[in-house]
């Protein structure tokens, strides 16, 4: 697949929607730009760019992850696709009616989200899956514009502390006051912010996060949307 085929065409989006997506060769974060340049050399079959949001433009639920995984979203070009974290996330979305339940390991699986969208606090894959503070701050503009591009948005579901903290700051909250916790819930900027432990393989393997725990968060999100 060519780069031009993988990058969202800004001519078919509104100005607000286009502003929510970084350019493919985004240079806001020098460390991430250099890392992606190296990935393009080493992994030419990967997407190797800022991963665009995926889902329904009329979404009422926005799931905010951390960042693309090297051989997951950075490979496929779709959030949470190609790694273990996506297996649980897309299972939960299907269970609570937010998708057509056609999730596979590639972006041509026919999957569609309903009333939901997925994005990341940091759009580019970071070395060792660990973005630094400056990168999180730099990418926050794209989170803000993504929120603004969703006219029906009501609930933001944050996966992990980095996602939670960046979302809280985006909405004008204080992380010392709106603290992260699994199942935490706050009203901010006219939205409800829910948070969960990240559905990473580490958290699920150690049982810090179980499937019932994760599903409970989605049940709460769906109840709020009713």
Image (cartoon, helix red, strand yellow):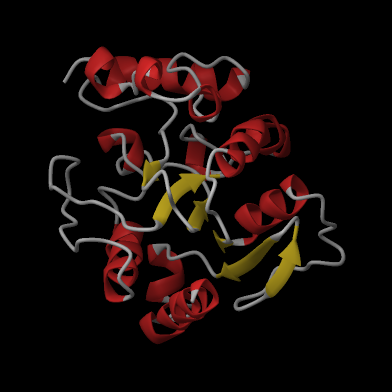
Residue 83, given in percent of the width and then of the height, sits at 29, 52
Question: Residue at (39%, 86%) from the top-left corner?
Answer: 212
Q: Is residue 115 shown above or below 210?
A: above
Q: Is residue 11 shown above or below 164?
A: above
Q: Quadrant of the N terminus?
A: top left
Question: Residue at (74%, 67%) from the top-left corner?
Answer: 187
Residue 166, given in percent of the width and then of the height, sits at 69, 49
143 vs 13, nearest the viewer: 13
Question: Residue at (28%, 35%) from the top-left corner?
Answer: 75
Residue 159 in sight from this viewpoint: no
Residue 90, given in percent of the width and then of the height, sits at 30, 62
Q: Is residue 79 shown above or below 199?
A: above
The answer to which image quadrant residue 106 occupies is top left
Residue 92, given in percent of the width and then of the height, sits at 33, 71
The answer to which image quadrant residue 214 occupies is bottom left
Q: Is residue 144 shown above or below 34?
A: below
62 sits to left or right of 101: right
116 vs 122, nearest the viewer: 116
118 sits to left or right of 142: left
The answer to which image quadrant residue 185 occupies is bottom right
């Amino acid at each position: 697949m060519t780069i031009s085929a993988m990058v969202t065409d800004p001519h078919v989006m509104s100005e607000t929607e286009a502003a929510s997506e970084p350019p493919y060769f985004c240079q806001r974060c020098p460390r991430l730009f250099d890392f992606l340049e190296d990935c393009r050399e080493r992994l030419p079959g990967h997407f190797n760019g800022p991963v665009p949001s995926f889902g329904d433009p009329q979404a009422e639920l926005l799931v905010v992850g951390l960042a693309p995984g090297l051989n997951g979203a950075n490979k496929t070009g779709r959030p949470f696709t190609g790694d273990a974290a996506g297996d649980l996330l897309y299972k939960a979305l299907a269970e609570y009616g937010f998708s057509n339940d056609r999730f596979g390991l590639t972006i041509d699986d026919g999957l569609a989200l309903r009333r939901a969208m997925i994005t990341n606090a940091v759009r580019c894959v970071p070395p060792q899956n660990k973005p630094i503070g400056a990168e999180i701050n730099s990418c926050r503009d794209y989170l803000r514009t993504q929120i603004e591009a969703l006219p029906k948005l009501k609930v933001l579901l944050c996966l992990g502390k980095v996602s939670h903290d960046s979302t809280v700051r985006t909405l004008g909250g204080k992380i010392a006051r709106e603290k992260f916790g699994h199942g935490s819930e706050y009203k901010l900027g006219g939205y409800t912010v829910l948070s969960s432990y990240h559905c990473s393989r580490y958290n699920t393997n150690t049982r810090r996060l179980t499937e019932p725990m994760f599903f409970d968060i989605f049940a709460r999100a769906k109840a709020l949307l009713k």
